[in-house]
Image: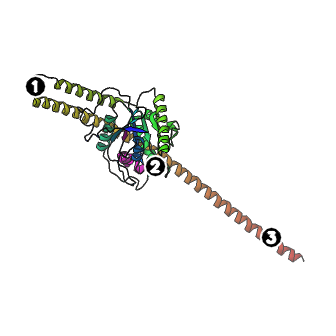
């Protein structure tokens, strides 16, 4: 089904912008981003899509994917797919969820400790890999378990951070907000026909998503800023290579200065992401606090209503018992009066 080629994973956040691995013109490649919680088979799904064991995958209650990774595949029709596997949502968004854990009162749900710096770095890294934008977000869920509250919180975190527009690019199998776009993947099947069929179904949905969005991938100011900086650095590097009268060492020093400038830009963008992440966390905290307050108010109201109902039932029972005693007393007096007459 596939003719595969592999792009090197960028070891550094965003990699070296001078590398030939960067593409500065639209290639027609479609970028799919996999998101999901621990144990849902996200990396295995990525392997099913690219047709080889490209992403590290194993059955584990702990997260296997700890950083963003990109793999590329070329289909029979020469369509290029760039698949980005991301850290597990319950790891990457643990910072947000640990903040809201008190409000939703789920003990032992969040096992990891992720600082906003880590989350910010991974978001920037994912955006950097996506380059021209994201054509579809694949939310991977397991058929073995129900859609959990942490998965709902994680998807809500994505919507809060990237905006509700991101829902237009999502494919998953439970939420109505994604227009009922769903596909079932069996990542353990050895049947080549089944593999081909489920990939065909997925690509059909990806095409639907692309068409529904006017052929435009999801982008925002972060995408534009990163691409602008990378393009600038690439052009500067090209100019340096063409300079006459400079030694190899001098050209190398110029490139290092430009790379340092680009890395400083990445750092500033990451700080912006971290700030936005904290704002998202604050909004979720307020939202969940309101929900918790409303829930507690409803519980108190229900408790008071139950208490009032119990009190009314108690009084009614006492009234009936008293009426029954009075009836029995009257009957006893009546019986004694009848005996006296005889």
Q: Nearer the viewer, mark 1 or mark 2?
A: 2
Residue 340 in picture, x, y percent from top left: 86, 77
Q: What residue did someone put label 2 on?
A: 190
Residue 108's image quarter? bottom left
Left or right for 243, reference 129? left
Q: Which residue sits at x=47%, y=41%?
A: 196
Residue 285 in view: no
Q: Which residue sits at x=68%, y=60%?
A: 316
- Disc number placed over residue 61 in the picture, else none: none
If you read the primary sequence from the N terminus, does the residue marked by circle 1 or circle 2 appear first?
2
Q: Are marks 1 and 3 in contact (CB under 8 Å)?
A: no
Left or right for 251, reference 110? left
Residue 92 in picture, x, y percent from top left: 35, 45
Q: At numbered mark 1, what does the secondary structure look like: helix, strand or loop? A: loop
Left or right for 136, reference 65? right
If you read the primary sequence from the N terminus, does the residue marked by circle 3 or circle 2 appear first?
2
- Give the crowd class for mark 1: few <14, some 14-19, many >=20 residues within 10 Å: few
Residue 79's image quarter? top left
- Give the crowd class for mark 2: few <14, some 14-19, many >=20 residues within 10 Å: few
Q: Is residue 114 magenta?
A: no
- Disc number placed over residue 331 in the picture, else none: 3
Q: Quadrant of the C terminus?
A: bottom right
Q: Nearer the viewer, mark 1 or mark 3?
A: 1
Q: Quadrant of the N terminus?
A: top left
Q: Which residue sits at x=49%, y=34%?
A: 204
- Give the crowd class for mark 3: few <14, some 14-19, many >=20 residues within 10 Å: few
Please tell me whether residue 101 is drawn above or below residue 238 in the rendered image: below
User: What segment carries the magenta color?
Assistant: 83-104
Left or right for 211, reference 252? right
Q: Are marks 3 and 2 in contact (CB under 8 Å)?
A: no
Q: What residue did someone put label 1 on?
A: 246
């Amino acid at each position: 089904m596939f003719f595969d080629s592999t792009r090197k994973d960028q070891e550094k956040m965003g990699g070296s912008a001078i590398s030939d691995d960067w593409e500065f013109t639209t290639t027609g490649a479609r970028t799919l981003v996999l998101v999901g919680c621990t144990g849902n088979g996200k990396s295995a799904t990525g392997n099913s899509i690219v047709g080889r064991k490209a992403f590290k995958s194993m059955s584990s209650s702990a997260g296997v994917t700890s950083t963003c990774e990109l793999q590329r595949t070329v289909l029979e029709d020469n369509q290029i797919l760039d698949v980005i596997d991301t850290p597990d949502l319950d790891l990457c968004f643990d910072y947000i969820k640990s903040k809201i854990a008190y409000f939703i009162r789920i003990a032992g749900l969040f096992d990891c400790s992720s600082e906003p710096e880590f989350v910010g770095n991974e978001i920037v890294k994912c955006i950097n890999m996506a380059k021209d934008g994201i054509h579809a977000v694949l939310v991977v869920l397991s058929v073995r378990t129900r859609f959990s509250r942490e998965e709902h919180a994680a998807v809500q975190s994505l919507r809060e951070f990237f905006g509700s527009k991101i829902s237009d690019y999502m494919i998953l199998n439970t939420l109505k907000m994604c227009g009922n776009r769903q596909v079932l993947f069996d990542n353990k099947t050895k049947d080549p026909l089944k593999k081909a069929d489920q990939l065909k179904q997925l690509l059909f949905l990806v095409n639907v998503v692309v068409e529904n969005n006017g052929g435009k991938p999801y982008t925002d100011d972060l995408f534009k800023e990163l691409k602008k900086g990378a393009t600038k650095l690439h052009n500067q590097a090209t100019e340096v290579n063409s300079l006459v009268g400079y030694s190899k060492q001098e050209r190398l020093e110029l490139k290092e200065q430009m790379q340092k400038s680009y890395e400083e830009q990445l750092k500033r963008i990451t700080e912006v992401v971290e700030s936005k992440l904290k704002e998202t966390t604050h909004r979720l905290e307020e939202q969940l606090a309101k929900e918790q307050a409303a829930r507690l108010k409803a519980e108190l109201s229900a408790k008071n209503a139950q208490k009032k109902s119990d009190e009314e039932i108690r009084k009614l029972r006492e009234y009936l018992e008293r009426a029954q005693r009075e009836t029995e007393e009257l009957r006893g007096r009546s019986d004694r009066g009848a005996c006296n007459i005889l």
